[in-house]
Image (spheres, rainbow, N blue to C red):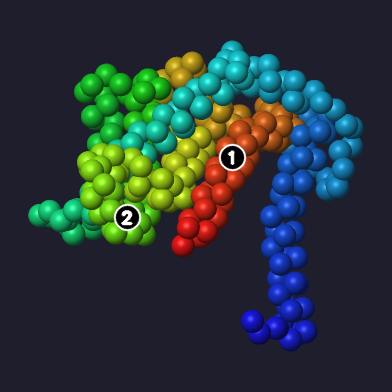
Amino acid sequence: MRKMNWFKQLLTQIALIVIGFYVLVPIWGAIRLAFDGSLKSRPVEFRLFPKVFSLEPFFTVLDRPYQSVDFSHLLVNSMIVSIGAAFIALILGASLAYAFARFRFPGKKPALFVLLLAAMLPPVAFMTPLYIVLSMVQLRTTLLGLTLVYATFALPFCIWNMRAGFQSVSKELEEAAFLDGANSLQTFGHISLPLALPSITIAGLIAFLMGYSEFAMGWLFVSEAETVTLAMSIYAMVQSGNAQPWSILASMFIIMSLPIVIVFAFLQNTLLDRMLFISQKK
């Protein structure tokens, strides 16, 4: 490999430092606000460290951050919606992606184009038809209806991403399984699915994040406080203006980020281990 000269290396290091500050400064700002007990509304001065160190904002968030709803209830709602949306998107998307990757059938290319178009369209374009359909089946104001909404948003991306993963699996491996007596379902479950796991993991992570962090469109499908998620509660707190100290908003942001960090770390380890396994097999 060619080595960069000192000037290019210096520019690269400076660029990486700037990017690092761009990422870390907002995170540090949120941490500083979360532990500042002196805030009564929004901050009016710049500080690197809390003026009055306090854990009271975290206790307030963990008690009842949104109206009379407990934090645990909001967290359960978010987990049900995000995990459910990821599960539905992966189950339906895996079968469709495998069909698009391995089989030939009439309308295959137009269907792929429609899926690509659906993935590129803004989610707001689906709000009216989803509102009408879920209202007809009386699921609009339920957690199941919200889960179906987020699964619909994530499904086109999941299909395209997992289709690429199934296409990377060698057809000779599947043919060898057929020669050994395996049927189509066994070949899919024991050969194609494990080898396409990195793409499936990425698709599941994106679907989970979409259901966990989306708040703007979710209000259209929620009418009661008992079905509000964590992301929606943060939006409601921001809309209240100066009624909530920014320390509570920052502590809510930190607590809400913890499940995402845990899920991402778990899936990242699984993804790296599987990619290393595949490289060793090759």
212 vs 99, left or right, is right
In the foreground, 93 or 274: 274
Q: Is residue 44 left or right of residue 151?
A: right
Q: Nearer the viewer, residue 40 or 24?
A: 24
Helix, strand or loop at label 1? It is helix
Q: 30 above or below 166?
A: above
Residue displayed at 77% across by 40% down: 31
Please tell me which residue is depicted at 72% across the width and 20% down the height of the picture: 60
Q: Looking at this rendering, what residue extends furthest in the front direction?
A: 180
Which residue of the protein is positioned furthest toward the top in this rendering? 68
- Give me the residue at 35% from left, 56% from top: 169
Q: Give the CA separation, mark 1 to mark 2.
A: 29 Å
Q: Residues within 10 Å of mark 2 (few under 14, many from 20)?
A: few
Mark earlier in primary sequence (1, 2): 2
> Camera-side residue: 164 or 125?
164
Disc 2 designates what residue? Answer: 173
Q: Is residue 275 above or below residue 235?
A: below
Q: Position of residue 202 (x, y in %)?
A: 47, 48
Q: Which mark is residue 146?
A: none
Residue 46 locus on image (x, y percent): 83, 48
SS under mark 2: helix
* Residue 152 in view: no
Q: Which mark is residue 266?
A: 1
